[in-house]
Image (cartoon, rainbow, N blue to C red):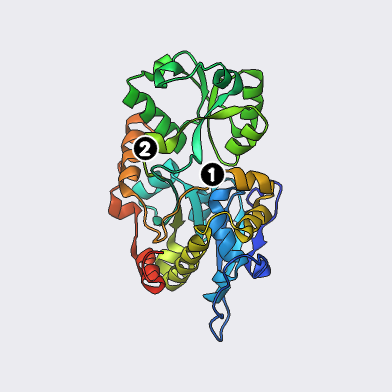
Amino acid sequence: MKRWPLLGGVALTAASLAGAAGGCRRATPSPAGGERDRVRVSYAPFVSYAPLFIAADAGLFRAHGLDVELVRMPVYDSTAALLHGDVDVASNYLSIGALNAIAKGERLRIVADKGYEATGGCAANALFARRALVTGGQLSGVASLRGRRVAVQSGTVEEFWFDRMLERAGVPRADVNVVTLLSEGRAAALGTGAVDLVAWSEPFLSQAAAEGLGAVWKGAGEVIPDLQWAYVLYGRSLLDARPDVGRRFTLAYLEGVRTYLEGKTEGNVASIVRHTGLDPDVVRRGCWLAVRPDGRIDTASVLDFERWAKLKGYLDAIVPEERFWDPSFVAWASLRLGGGR
């Protein structure tokens, strides 16, 4: 199997962590007889992966006859890992790479929600402004971004909502000095004044605020309410070769989602800290992305993302809903969970 970067960590086997988080909801007894089905799942050390962490720590995957291995890798590497067969499940942000692969005929489907920017909710993805701009009252409406240096990663969902924000405010992008800056350099750039704002996500938003670098100025959900930010993606392994395993994985995952939706409980915080290495205070202070308990996604925002990406030249062709979204797995799981929360 190809060795994927571990970002300073190691791959974790969910079976070895079962029952470790005392505050998490306990699973029902494991099905009798037979070996558990192995499922390899990509993850990154962010709070948005919490339902996976919680399901692993509470033994929910084991309860459904699964031996889940959480494989740590950079977020946008997960689609390639899925296509190469190095993982069975990719948990990703809204991705041009995945949509282009589907457009070219690759057997990939979004099968469940992993996070969206809920209307009226907190901002897990936002524009973060440096302290001098905030304290000096130099930012008001979107028009006040004219001439400012704003760090935005090209070809991503953060660029999508940033462009939509400018468009809706009637501010030409050419009026804003948009720069590309990797996440690792953004805190230093804010501190020195090299940039004025950054399009960022948790936990970086909470960490930067705690360090006194500035404050959240505008959240993605204010621009595109209920924006579909992240999802769970299956490939051939679970769509075709082992759909029953895919259904059981979805069921355990949605059980993890429902525990996650109980909020910042001691068990949930402990599970996130264990898998991410984040400071518990950062986890408690930060905004946790909303996740739908029935696992369904907002297909309208995915289609809007595609239209934007096609116009920008990032996407080769618009992929229709029936080719990127397979609701059958969450429908099967929701029936067994009794519908909503």
Q: Identify the image quadrant of the N terminus.
A: bottom right
Question: SS class of the residue under badge 1?
Answer: loop
Image coords of residue 220 (percent x, y):
43, 36
- Callout 2 amino acid: Ile
Q: Is residue 279 above or below residue 326?
A: above
Instruction: State the separation of the CA atoms marked 1 and 2.
Output: 17 Å
Residue name at image x 59 percent, y 59 percent: 53
Residue 141 seen in the current view = yes
Label number found at residue 257: none
Residue name at image x 53 percent, y 24 percent: 197
Q: Is residue 160 above or below residue 103?
A: above
Closer to us: 26 or 88:
26
Quarter of the image holding residue 191?
Answer: top right
Circle 2: is it few (<14), some (14-19), or many (20+) Cα within 10 Å? some
Image coords of residue 54 (percent x, y):
58, 61
Question: SS class of the residue under badge 2?
Answer: loop
Quarter of the image holding residue 131?
Answer: top right
- Callout 1 amino acid: Cys
Tell whether 207 sits left or right of 146.
right
Image coords of residue 14 (percent x, y):
62, 66
Image coords of residue 183 (percent x, y):
60, 33
Q: Is residue 179 above or below residue 98?
A: above
Q: Which residue is labeled 2 in the image?
A: 224
Tell whether 187 sits left or right of 227.
right
Q: Which residue is labeled 1 in the image?
A: 287
